[in-house]
Amino acid sequence: MPFKNILSSISPISEFKIPCSTISFLDNGIKVHSLQDNEASIVKIDFIFEAGTWYQECLLQSLLANSLLLSGTSSFSEKEIAEKLDFYGAWVQLSNSYRSASFSLFALPKFLKETLTVVESTLKHSEISESAFFRLLEKQKQSFLLSKKKVKVQANKLLNKNLWGENNPYGWCLEIADFEKITVGLVRDFYHRFYTSDNCQIVVTGNVTDEILSQLNSFFGGKDWGGKEILPEPKYAFEKSEQKEIFQSQKDAVQSAVCLGCEMIPQTHQDYDLLRFVIFVLGGYFGSRLSSVIREEKGFTYGITARCRTTKDISSIVISTETATQYVKPLIDEVFVQIRRLQQELMSEEELQMAKNYALGEIARSSDGLFQLSELYISLMFNQGEVGALQHFIETIQTITAEEIQLIANRYLNVDDFICVVVG
């Protein structure tokens, strides 16, 4: 039989599960989540602190505290830290979000003890050097000035400001004056208050042996870096704007950025996963309604997406794209036409199955490899509160019907709820 006539069999994803984590505790109470893979040659250790922008007293404080962890300690200079990590084949990724900040270490198990000696000094005794502070601040300032020229960035900020109000981390808008307000003292204070054992959890991924757990306990299980105060939970006001259309002129803009958004049901709601899939059908993949009509048929844009933006605190639907100025109004009108189509017409079985396959395929790609799984685990654990949320979403995708999609679209998608932002 000719090779070209042999077709590979296609099997749908029937079940997907995050590997079960093993929970243990260091002597000082730090919770350790272990994701086991006996074949892994590298170990990944995530130190996760509740030290995101939610907890800062002024803009840039959380970001700079996290970004400057490797700027030098009482034992090692910034250069020595970089050289030692490189010598032992290790590297570090730093990240900062609304609620959390993380220090992610990738290391070779045979040099883990030597590597953790450097990491311990970095997490416990970072000095946040003044020279590194001003160097990074200038870099962030230049990045900010560059972002102000990007219509998509500005539209996103304006949408968040009008959707949530400007008196909380989701609506805060960084201004050039904020770079003058932040000081190295404020960053050091944030570091000392929030980068403590009382405010930390650890996720270990790889061939997690008893020796690795013992080393973690030896370096990080002591009382020497406990918090000196009980950190209060900040309270913020969320105030949605009454204005439904916001237009901002941007000099020299080649295109206009369009962002439409509205608040949606929280992730704890029983219909959340159903609505999440409806938004995926609307604009979550290349063959979605918005992409097929607005991009392919009408040629208004090179790309348009609709997605659910969900954190521990807020949930929203966001539709975003860029287009030529003359297409702004017809594009927005067509978005609402496609929403109404979901409400008024039943999807064909062919389109429904295609959307299901795309959605399940994206989940499979996001979990391809142990370290990707660890990122997924962390996201589920610290944003949605439970790892089982993913399996529930998969089951929703597999069982949802065209009738349910129409019902959910009518129940939760109201075009009058959307705030529309145009920058260009």
Image (cartoon, rainbow, N blue to C red):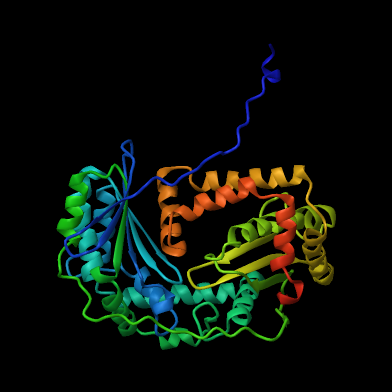
Q: Is residue 65 visible?
A: yes
**Number of numbered callouts drawn:** 0
Residue for point 16% across, 61% down = 27
Q: Nearer the viewer, residue 45 or 18?
A: 18
**Image quarter hosting the C terminus:** bottom right
Left or right side of 147 for 177:
left
Q: Is residue 327 above or below residue 164?
A: above
Residue for point 24% across, 60% down = 119
Residue for point 71% across, 66% down = 411
Q: Residue 182: percent from the left, percent from the top?
A: 40, 85
Q: Is residue 70 visible?
A: no
Left or right side of 301 for 33:
left
Locate residue 223: give its quadrant: bottom left
Left or right side of 107 for 96:
right
Residue for point 58% across, 80% down = 164
Locate residue 228: give its quadrant: bottom left
Q: Nearer the viewer, residue 376 or 278?
A: 278
Left or right side of 12 for 424:
right
Locate residue 267: give its quadrant: bottom right
**Image quarter hosting the N terminus:** top right
Q: Residue 5: percent from the left, percent from the top?
A: 71, 19
Q: Residue 336: percent from the left, percent from the top?
A: 79, 67
Q: Residue 115: percent from the left, percent from the top?
A: 22, 53
Q: Is residue 74 above or below residue 390?
A: below
Q: Nearer the viewer, residue 181 or 388?
A: 388
